[in-house]
Amino acid sequence: MTTEKIFRRLLKNCLIESGVTLVEVLIACSLTVVLFSSVFAILISSFNSVNLQTAQIDAQQTAQLALDRMDRELRQAGRPFLLQALVPGSYETIVFTADLNNDGVSETIKYDYQRSTGDLIRQVNATGAINFDSSPKDVLAGYIANTSSQRIFTFYGTDLNTSLDPSLPQSDIINKTHIIKIRLIIDRNPNKPPAPFDMATNVKLRNFGY
């Protein structure tokens, strides 16, 4: 007698003795597979959710460090204070002068939001010139999801009640700016949870002698 025949006979005897049919065994096995598949899917979903939330928190923390740095450096800005935009009225780029090293020599600093990559870039020209072709690009923050109507930089006079009219000549905006609002909307995974995180800081310029 072959091994296969012995196995079949033993299985038949077990089923007869237990009163369970082969169909019932197959149904039980199928239900077990479905159950374990459901549990496994839930575990995978939970694991992915935790990973997404962790990545979002990391991006938020990096953005907060960027806000703190820009706040600190902009408070050191002095006249002449230079503002530039990639597109007039877009307010996605700021160029300004500041003595970052307190050595009596002003550097020129550029913050530039690159919408195509979602990165906020910082460049410094140590000579004070407004030329950044050879200046390294440091990513201050990534995964920025501001739309064109959600300005990165908004300029105000002496209070936050009304922003300066973007149609004003650039020289007027420069001379009238007392406060700059920096707003970053962080979205590590667009169109997926968790929801985007909206963060902002208001920088009061202090070295202009007002």
Image: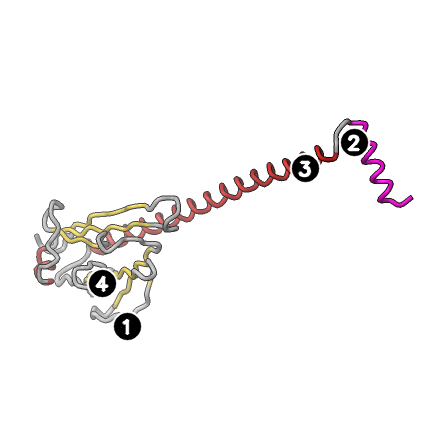
Where is mark 1, residue-wise?
133
Amino acid, disc 1: Asp
Measuring 67% from the left and 35% from the top, which residue is drawn there? 27
Where is mark 3, residue-wise?
29
Q: Label 3: state its secondary structure.
A: helix
- Provide the residue span drawn in magenta: 1-18
Q: Which numbered disc, 4 or 1, marks the residue that appears first in the sequence?
A: 4
Q: Seen in the image, is 195 located left or right of residue 110?
A: right
Where is mark 4, residue-wise?
103
Which residue of the protein is positioned furthest toward the right in this rendering? Answer: 1
Front of the two marks 1 and 3:
3
Separation of marks 3 and 2 at Cα, in angstroms? 15 Å
Q: At which x and y percent is residue 203?
A: 19, 50
Q: Which mark is residue 15?
A: 2
Measuring 89% from the left and 45% from the top, which residue is drawn there? 2
Callout 1 environment at 10 Å: few (<14), some (14 to 19), or many (20+)? few
Residues at badges 3 and 2 in contact (C-beta under 8 Å)?
A: no
Q: How is the image coloured?
A: secondary structure
Amino acid, disc 3: Cys
Quadrant location of the N terminus in the rendered image: top right
Q: Seen in the image, is 5 located left or right of residue 102?
A: right
